Image (cartoon, helix red, strand yellow):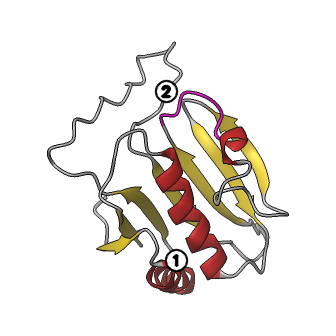
Amino acid sequence: MAPREVVVVDVGDVTTLARLLAEVRGRGGWVNVRPEVAEDVAVPPTPTPMAVFSKRGPAVPLATWTPEVAGRRAEPATVGVQHGVGSALRDRLVGTAAQLPEGWRVVGDHPRRGLVVQVPAGVADEVVAAWLLEVVDLASVVPHTGRVEVLVYG
């Protein structure tokens, strides 16, 4: 499925990303965030599903945010981060700007499959946006341009 919209923002542009999260929450869908890598940067190949024993995900991280779901099957907002840092990501975030905020619940943290976190209800879009920008910056194995691509679906 192709994204409905692709927006490139600086890693410090929390306001634009927060606005996009709010728009998706209002109509449904999800948002992917990944660092922009210059064309002349060599990116190691992402291990395929056949690489059963690989302990790495993609060298260019991909964060996916899905909004909370209300109703009978209510679910909290969720953030998933595929990354290639070669170990669980949660421990690497401690003491950094991407440290998990209080109350965020880790539901999975695997070197190859990535980090999955539930975001408590009521967390401001600006807080989620700031964390997304920090985590993709920190988890990038290759140098990037200082900007991220925001892919809006739905």
Q: Which residues are magenta?
A: 84-89
Classify 152 as above or below 145: below
**What's the residue at 43%, 61% (across, down)?**
33
Task: Say which quadrant the C terminus sits in.
Answer: bottom left
> At which x and y percent is residue 104?
78, 60
Identify the amino acid type marked 1. Gly
> At which x and y percent is residue 73?
76, 66
- The residue beneath circle 2 is 56
1 left or right of 106 in image: left
Q: Residue furthest top?
A: 53
**What's the residue at 46%, 67% (across, down)?**
31
Q: Secondary structure at mark 2?
A: loop
Of marks 1 and 2, which one's residue comes earlier in the chain?
1
122 left or right of 31 in image: right
Task: Tell how many labels.
Answer: 2
Task: Say which quadrant the N terminus sits in.
Answer: bottom left
Q: Quadrant of residue 69?
A: bottom right
Q: Quadrant of residue 42?
A: top left
